[in-house]
Image: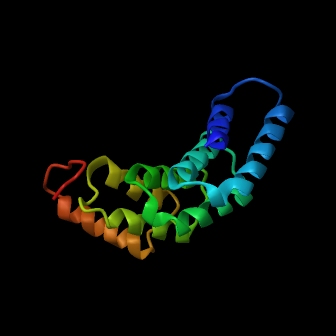
Amino acid sequence: ELHVQHCQSLARASGGSESTREANWKWAGDRACKLADTMKAEDLARCAGAFASAEQRDFRVLFLLAEEAIAKAPSFEVAEAVQMLEAYAALNVRNEHLFEALTKRLLTEEQPMAGEVLQRVLLAHRSLKLMELSTYAALEDLQSRHDGRPMTENCP
């Protein structure tokens, strides 16, 4: 998706006036809102990641990206789901439905989450104080099953 690449390049860009940067992100946000319903899971995650990298806390954009991610949760790969959750955590944007949907998706993996991936998902939940979610309890159960064993990315 070209727009996602544009958002990523905006996030990496330095320089320019504050008003130019603001105008660029306003345009990027407007465009993301128009394209959100056509974005694939990978594009949704990368777009949210770009907004997080640039510390752009545009609730309108983040709401629409989350709504699409919730609807498309079954199509998310592990890395995409983690990227999306971490982006919302980095921006300090609580979206319980997003965290429930993507964490449920992660919990359906044939190989259970472990190691760094599990820690990153737990941290995203904790940073937004989402420990009351049923999916957080499932993550903690998964972690407790791995306690005392070496943590690997995919633990049986």
- Quarter of the image where the N terminus is located: top right
The mark total stands at 0
- Residue drawn at x 65%, y 32% is 9
Asked if residue 135 is positioned above or below residue 46 in the image, the reply reads below
Residue 77 appears in view? yes
Q: Residue extending furthest left? A: 149
Which of the pair 44/2 is nearer the observer? 2
Q: Position of residue 99 (x, y in %)?
A: 49, 65
- 150 with respect to 98 (left or right): left
Asked if residue 26 is positioned above or below residue 85 in the image, the reply reads above
Would you identify the image quadrant in which residue 118 lies?
bottom left
Residue 90 appears in view? no
- Residue drawn at x 18%, y 58% is 147
- Quarter of the image where the C terminus is located: bottom left
Which of the pair 145/126 is nearer the observer? 145
- Residue drawn at x 86%, y 35% is 19
Q: Position of residue 131 (x, y in %)?
A: 44, 69
Q: Position of residue 47 (x, y in %)?
A: 60, 47
Asked if residue 138 is positioned above or below residue 126 in the image, the reply reads below
- 101 with respect to 95 (left or right): left
